[in-house]
Image (cartoon, rainbow, N blue to C red):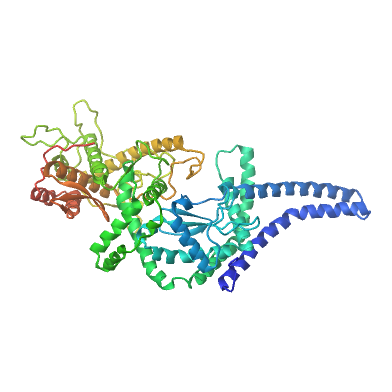
Amino acid sequence: MTGIGVEAGAQAARSRALAVLRVRSRALAVAVLPAGAAVILLTGASTGHLVGRGWDAARWAVGVLAVLVLLAAAGVGLVVARARPATSPTVPVPEESAPDLYRMVRDLADRLEVPAPSAIALTPDCDSWLEDRAHSAHGPPPRPAPGRPAGPRTPTPPVLVIGSPFLWWMRVGELRAVLAPVIAGTGPSAHPDIAAARRFVRGLDAAVAVASAPGRRPPARGLCAAVGWVARLLLRGCREHATQMERGVAAAASERAQAVDYGLRIVAQEQVGLAYAGWDRLLTRVALPAWRMGRWPSRLDAGVVAALTELSRRDRLAEGFTSRLGERPACDLLEEPGAVDEAASLLAARLFHGGPATPCSDWAPVDWQAYPEEVVDRTWRVDAARLHRVLDALGVRPSRHPGIPDPGGPTLARVLDHLATGGTPPAGPAHPHEPLRQAPVPPAPPAADGGGYSPQGPPASGDVTRSGGMDGRGMDADGEAEAEPGTDRSVALAARLTAELAREEAQAQRARKGAAGALQGPDSVVWAPGDPGLPPFPLQPHRTARELLADHVTAMVCCAAVDTAGAVPALDWLDGPSLLLGGERAADLAPKVLTLIEDGDPGPLRDWLTAFGIRPEKPVRLV
């Protein structure tokens, strides 16, 4: 059945689809109008009514115009028909790898009396939708479901895209309830008018993308600009109708799905919000530090369960959520959930960070057991090494403490002594043969792609604040630069750290872009024209210069705690990298580091170090 019944939303969607098709018909009428005029003039000449030099000239002019307009219309139509519509990057789930999931989806479609989706795919996001992939550029259509022979005129149903975190956090009944409104959308999608309207809109969108692709020569660029102008004009004409059509389809699907698991769907929607919060926290706090180190966690979806379980342990409001864990999880519907989780985790790393599509020496998977050693400890030591390199560039001499075998080694005492006073930063060289360096920040090199995205660190030194200030300064209510709190030395050190990190990230981005281009295969997803390594949804948080300095000082403190006091790097599922002192998380370190940076007072931090037996005068191991 087509799914168009008594639902008011479906009727509204069909009327809007007809409006979209009328835009297409008007465009076709405009294209054939000169040809019609030429036919009239030629017919008049053959019947002896329209004769004379003036009519002959008109026939030649209109005939040439008609040919040119028809050729242009044919070219635009060919581009619209042949252009490949955009598709979401997903992990395909063949039926042999998830027979139970396909069986559940088909049973749900039978209960809703709508066509079953043609295939299932996963996306590393907390959302689900139907996606039309019937275009010939997307490959041959999927095989019809058993007992559902597809005739030559039967439209191919869309693909069901499911958020991978849903499969691991939700139970089978909850997933079924959440997917019911989505699957119900295949009914209106099968109507010929709605399907034709969607194909037309997607073809126009693909034609705009084709016309906007760079790298063409001037003659081809002009033709593509003309095609793009026509496609944009048609898109503007049918934009409102297409929007209302999709709203009508969604309303019809929601109305039809009310007959299936309606009560359970209300409870399942709470799990959707909880899964979204846990997924966002896991990506920004846990996965992003690993991606910056060239490692991608291979079990992100399993990490969502651990993060939300930890949340239920800490939050009284979430205590009831753990009782669900005794029920069957939706990931049991997969034959090999581990392999699917790994594929979804790699896709998440490419979407939100960029990089190669396959693992390599500089882009290796990491499991949760090895995360503290390979990510947390290494991140601390890389930041500490960068901090000491900047101190060397500023001419800060090593801290002198009697009884230390290596007085010139990297120590926490050197950082404390330098930030303890708020005077003018030293400009003398750290070594006799080192040239004199000035404290002001040199301009950072531009990003590898000419844009402002930096996949591993903060933006360049000219844009390091959340409010758009310069060199670590915010903007006050009047739009004037407002200096961040801190001493002269901390401000100068933070600025140099920002510039140093910007240089490293420019080099890393160029290397990543070259590696991604070398590994780009014929079936690989190109994120942007000419830039296969640029992620379309970067998670890069903006850190101010003060926050960047606080992170580096904290990393130096953690290195000293690990090397001198037996502390252990650990993973906190909600907050990311953490330090364990005596088996307990060190949660009171940040205020003391900020006191050192903003006020130049090392007293609270030194007291904290003494209380845990951390020796700042001992050298630490760096990367």
What is the residue that sits farthest to the left in this orientation?
A: 403
* Residue 492 in view here: no
Q: Residue at x 50, y 62 (%)?
A: 106
Q: Between residues 377 and 173, which one lies in front from this camera angle?
A: 173
Residue 71 screen position, x and y as percent: 72, 46
Q: Residue at x 63, y 40 (%)?
A: 220
Note whether 302 is above or below 564 in the view shown: below
Question: On the rendered structure, is 217 left or right of 363?
Answer: right
Residue 34 screen position, x and y as percent: 77, 53
Q: Quadrant of the N terminus?
A: bottom right
Note whether 380 is above or below 272 in the view shown: above
Q: Between residues 85 and 37, which one lies in front from this camera angle?
A: 85
Question: On the rendered structure, is 548 left or right of 145?
Answer: left
What is the residue that sits farthest to the top in this orientation?
A: 433
Note whether 171 is above or below 92 in the view shown: below
Q: How many marks?
A: 0
Q: Quadrant of the C terminus?
A: top left
Q: Between residues 240 and 376, which one lies in front from this camera angle?
A: 376
Q: Between residues 17 and 156, which one lies in front from this camera angle?
A: 156
Residue 430 screen position, x and y as percent: 19, 31
What is the residue that sits farthest to the front in this orientation?
A: 147
* Residue 76 in view here: yes
Question: On the rendered structure, is 419 left or right of 18?
Answer: left
Question: On the rendered structure, is 181 left or right of 7?
Answer: left
Residue 517 screen position, x and y as percent: 46, 36
Q: Residue at x 25, y 33 (%)?
A: 437
Q: Quadrant of residue 127?
A: bottom left
